[in-house]
Image (cartoon, rainbow, N blue to C red):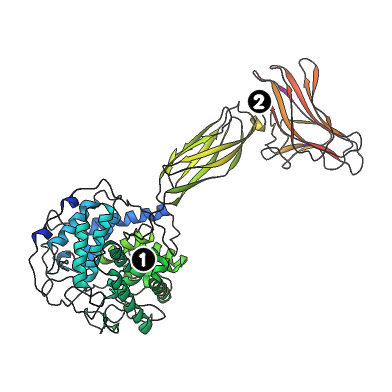
Amino acid sequence: MSPRTRRTLSLGATISTLTLGLMTATASQSAHAAGPAHAFPSHQTYKVGVMPSASQAVRDAAVQKQYDSWKATYLVHGCATNEYYVSTKGDKDATNNGPVSEGQGYGMNIVPLMAGYDANAQAEFNGLWQLVKDHEDQYGMMQWQLDGKTCKYYSSGAPDGATDGDLDIGYGLILADKQWGGYQADALNWLSNFYAHNVAPDGHLKCEDDGPNTDTRPSDQMIDHLRAFAAYDSAHDWNKVITRTEAVDSSLVSNYSSAYGLLPDFVVGANATPQPAPAHYQENQPDNIVGYNSIRVPWHMGTDALLNGTAASFELSDATKWSNCAKQVSGANPGKVYPHLNLNCTGYNTTDLAEEAGDAIGPSAMAAGDQAWTDTIWSYLQTNPYGDGYFGESIKTLVMIVMAGDYWSPAASSTPPPANNFSVSDAPASGTVTAGSSVSSTVSTAVVSGSAESVSLTASGLPSGATASFSPAGVTAGGGSTLTIATSASTASGTYPVTITATAPSATHTATFSLAVTGPGGGGGAIVNGGFESGSLTGWTVNSGSASAVSSPVHAGGFAALVGAGAETNGLSKLSQKFTAPSGSSTLSLWYNVSCTDSSGGYATVLLVDNTSSSTTRVLNRVCTTGQGWKSASAALTAGHSYTVELESRDDGVSGTPTNAVYDDVTVS
């Protein structure tokens, strides 16, 4: 991007001596509070609009990454040992990359918003505030432009302030007071000086503290800041400022950009009939159109609309128009939102490109409810295609905090941070396992509201011989874990509802995993393929008639055995298996489902032949029913004896009355 010249004209003023009271930091500021009241991330529920589709955890991590980069590059410890300043590196806004009040204000907003993530935030804020106090002009506002080595005012004329920076500094003091406490006196004193020298008699904001009462700069009009001032400082009529500011902007939009909501860099006649300033009113870029000043307007308008909803009706309307214009002129490419736009939404200079022009649209796109445009801008924020310096990267940091949902308002009427809450789910929610084997499921958590918390995971309701483990055993809400249930050879066949319990400081939530256990090979004990989960009759012998593995109906798992057929099969169908009852076993169990419509001679039955003692037990007496569903049957065993279990179905061959039986989960325990 081409270098920006922020101001080329400084209006006359005289220098006054700073008072000792303003030079001295209060004891309460120096003392660190126990901790920030709104530790980052401080998730907010905005009153209108959409959020980027990226998860809350992803958005928070992106803000942290951007903040780390911004802090490492632009936050400078100096000039004095107890001072910090925001360097204008990369933009040539001050000699030796020194600070300007605009950047100092950005820093005094960013740092308290990142408290909690940045353990040194309060010390850094105090250093930023100290530099401001050490370089005030005759009206108690910050000297707007300082050298990076000496921190001496170097711009032409007597030191004066700039409204945007001074307004952000006041807002930063309120943020700090709400975050740590101890800044109220400084904040109220600053707001009093600001109101006396930066607010015109009719209520509009002047461009600088020593400037005329006839002009204004729309990029200074941070309505969300003014609403916070009104809630914090009852000694001054900030609502008058809000009302006049909205009236000025509304008049400009109606008369010069009704379809697009665009506002020029500078405005004259602000105390009467507002109109765009002459082309080179204050800067060496066209001041009568959108330029490097007013590209910040959609950021401010969108932010106020998000925080205040229908109470900010003008801001919401203008944010929507501005977002639509930017999308139209750029072809939905944030990188082609030109920093210079005519008020009819056409490009003034299409060769000059700057990252911050697209970045600043983000909050307006959100407020407008444009999900696709919001997502595109959020992705664009993760880049720096034009190598922008301090100005673009500072705006990006604040816009990302807003778009991540972490921009809390210090105004008393703002929505309080929602309570922490989360959800838990598992997929798949059921599984079948052969006794002695394992089954797994993915357990997922998500932030429902508030901040991400640590969540511990446990499982209960397991059958005897089974254990559950989670990898990892705990997650941060938004993360996932793998549940593994391991069974032993002695785990009894059956279906078990396993309860997954997720516990966090805010709440406890549960999910259920349905565990179906079959014996070795799909059955239990010495029986091979007793649950027929091989999908075949492996381990069994078809002695007569018809038998096959079927997938429906089944008692548990995926398969069962059909003895007989769907049509008449005149005679006996038998399926059998020989086994030895192992040590410790005492029972043969099984499930059956009979379909018998024969008028005479049809039935289902199960025999257990003790080959060792040459005796036979009828596990299931002959039965001819239909529509009864699954039933269970069992018989006693003697450990060490050899047995043959016979699953039978007899059809009488009468046309239209077929008989068959489905058997499943034959187990020895």
Q: Which residues are magenta?
A: 562-582
Look at the image and tell me in which quarter the C terminus lies: top right
Q: Amino acid at mark 2?
A: Gly
Quadrant for residue 660, please give it: top right
Furthest-left residue in view? 17
Relative to 632, does residue 23 appear above or below in the rendering? below
Q: What residue is shown at x 15% (from left), y 68% (from top)?
A: 143
Earlier residue among tags 1 and 2: 1
Residue at the disc numbered 1: 303
Q: What residue is shown at x 46% (from left), y 66% (from top)?
A: 372
Q: Is residue 593 left or right of residue 319?
A: right
> Where residue 592 appears, x then y in whole percent?
76, 34
Relative to 324, does residue 67 appear above or below in the rendering? above
Q: Is residue 602 left or right of residue 338?
A: right
Q: What residue is shown at x 52% (from left), y 35% (from top)?
A: 459
Which secondary structure, mark 2?
loop
Residue at the disc numbered 2: 525
> Where residue 528 appears, x then y in whole percent?
69, 29
User: Is residue 383 visible from the viewing direction of this image?
Assistant: no
Magenta span contains residue 28: no
Q: Main secondary structure of the magenta part?
A: strand
Furthest-top residue in view? 613
Which secondary structure, mark 1?
helix
Residue 630 disc label: none
Question: Count of labels shown?
Answer: 2
Quadrant for residue 385, please give it: bottom left
Magenta span contains residue 580: yes
Q: Amino acid at mark 1?
A: Thr
State the separation of the CA atoms marked 1 and 2: 67 Å
